[in-house]
Amino acid sequence: MPFKLHLSHLVRSTMILMAAFLVNKGLAIGRQVVIARAFGTGGDYDAFVAAFRLPDILFMLISGGALATAFIPILSERLTLHPPGDPAGWRLTSATLNTMLLVTTAAAALIALVALPLVEWLIAPGFPPETQQLTANLMRLALISTLIFSVSGLAGGVLHVHQHFLLPALAPIIYNLGLIAGALFLAPNLGVYGLMWGAVAGAAGHLLIQVPGLIRYRLRYYPDLGWGDPGLRQVIRLLGPRILTLGVIQVNFLIIFNLASRLGQGSVSALDYGWDLMQMPQTIIGSAIGIVLFPTMAELAARSDRAGLRRTVEQALRVILALSIPATVGLIVLGRPLIQLMFERGEFGPDSTAAVYQSLQFWALALVAHCALEVVNRLFYAQKDTTTPLIGAVVGMLVNGGLALLLYRVLDAGGLALSNAVAVTIEVLVLLAIANQRMAGVEIRPLLSTLARTALAAGAMGAAVLSFTALFPVLSPLLGAAAGGVLGLLVYVVAGLLLGLEELRAVPRLIRR
């Protein structure tokens, strides 16, 4: 089927994901508001944040992003080669699920057994002893949600293979609702343990909402490991480099939060709040585009359509630049009133606002690179190359580790966020250089043109918002954020159109289509 026939589905799927991610991020703001009111940036929330570090690593390495990257192309090939109704696809899915659960359960049991030493020596050596014990207890509960997410992540991969994006996009919304319920109804009596039980309930909902989609595609489960299945062996072979890549990424965050724990109470929380705020536009822009483009890029690569692959990646990156650069400027110039509006109440006071804003300013500098990485990595994965992204990740890890050690005493939590921003930017540039040289994977000149025009328009936007806030310094956070946001958007659009930023003209057309 020609690529152009897929365009309407591609645009529709992207818009579905963007809308679902937007709703989810709205709920995430509500979640953080509720959590901030209950816990602020105190030691209990420090422990909650730190408790997820190893469970998150376990999920990402075994059953999260790594598995999806290896499993989706193999299952897609299996379904293509077998007639509809053939159980071969479900046999591969069952074998993958059973093997993954076996490994994840064993690893989770080991982590639970040595949770306290891991916290004391690796995760948060700077925490006081009582906070370290709390972190270890919470980590054991967090591992329950990790096991549930393992099944849910595979379910989402199966639905993506069938080009079904809606239910996997709704699943994070259910997870956030679980956290909000835990903070509102369980935390008043159970403290931070109530918040963690809300996370476990949300993980269960994350899985259950995807079950109707699996039933629609005639779910079949086979209770065997299937280690003789050549498809499973191929999945395992592809997992190796991807696991190492994700391991390197998680080492970056271990370094960051390890050093943050040495900066005093509230530093880990401030860093996490800032990361969450940066992740809101990153998910809506980068993740939505990357998730939907991946099957299309894989199809183009399978057909050896280098020109189509090059054109697709170039257009995606230009749209990402046109959306993420103004979002970066917006986070920097409007971050303080946004934090005040969303979080400053209860235990979250002006000092917490100052700490979070300090980290957010530097996290914002990482936004463009994190969005671009969602597409650039998938350019290589689509061509069954999982080694090159590993090279980029190792370069990023080395830069991040070195800069973090240099900056965290100078800029506090902001220095750790800045080290990540510089490292991810270098990682993306390295991967683009490799793609351009080895595979002719990107067109650099149109990207540079879009970058220059977008930077000028975003600069005008930032100057306008700063001038507005200087003229009206006494506005409430609500009015300051709303009026500044509207003014900034108008200035950016007008300046972008005057500068000939074609991506701004393309967005309304895509939405109408």
Image (spheres, rainbow, N blue to C red):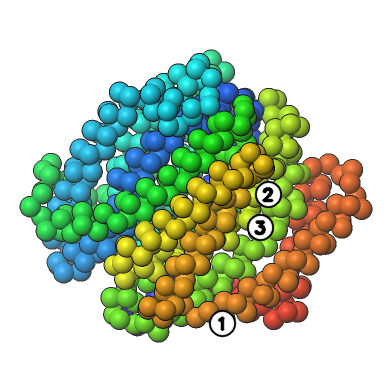
Residue placed most toward the observer, 47 or 255:
255
Q: Is residue 294 visible from the viewing direction of this image? A: no
Label 3 vs label 2: CA separation? 9 Å
Q: Is 161 rendered above or below residue 447?
A: above
* Image location of residue 265, percent across then percent down: 62, 26
Amino acid type of the residue that numbered disc 3 sits on in the rendered structure: Thr
* Image location of residue 219, percent across then percent down: 22, 50
Residue contact between numbered discs 2 and 1, judged by CB atoms under 8 Å: no
Amino acid type of the residue that numbered disc 2 sits on in the rendered structure: Gln
Which badge, 3 or 1, comes first in the chain's sequence? Answer: 3
Residue 144: image quadrant is: top left
* Image location of residue 27, percent across then percent down: 57, 42
Q: Is 27 rendered above or below residue 513?
A: above
Q: Residue at x 23, y 33 (%)?
A: 106
Residue placed most toward the observer, 381 or 485:
381
Q: Which residue is mark 2?
A: 361
Which of label 3 and label 2 is nearer to you?
A: 2
Q: Is 27 rendered above or below residue 450?
A: above
SS state under label 2: helix
Q: Residue at x 87, y 44 (%)?
A: 475
Q: Which residue is mark 3?
A: 328
Residue placed most toward the observer, 243 or 84:
243
Label 2 vs label 1: CA separation? 29 Å
Q: Is residue 209 left or right of residue 331?
A: left
* Image location of residue 89, percent across then percent down: 18, 57
Amino acid type of the residue that numbered disc 1 sits on in the rendered structure: Arg
Q: Which residue is mark 1?
A: 445
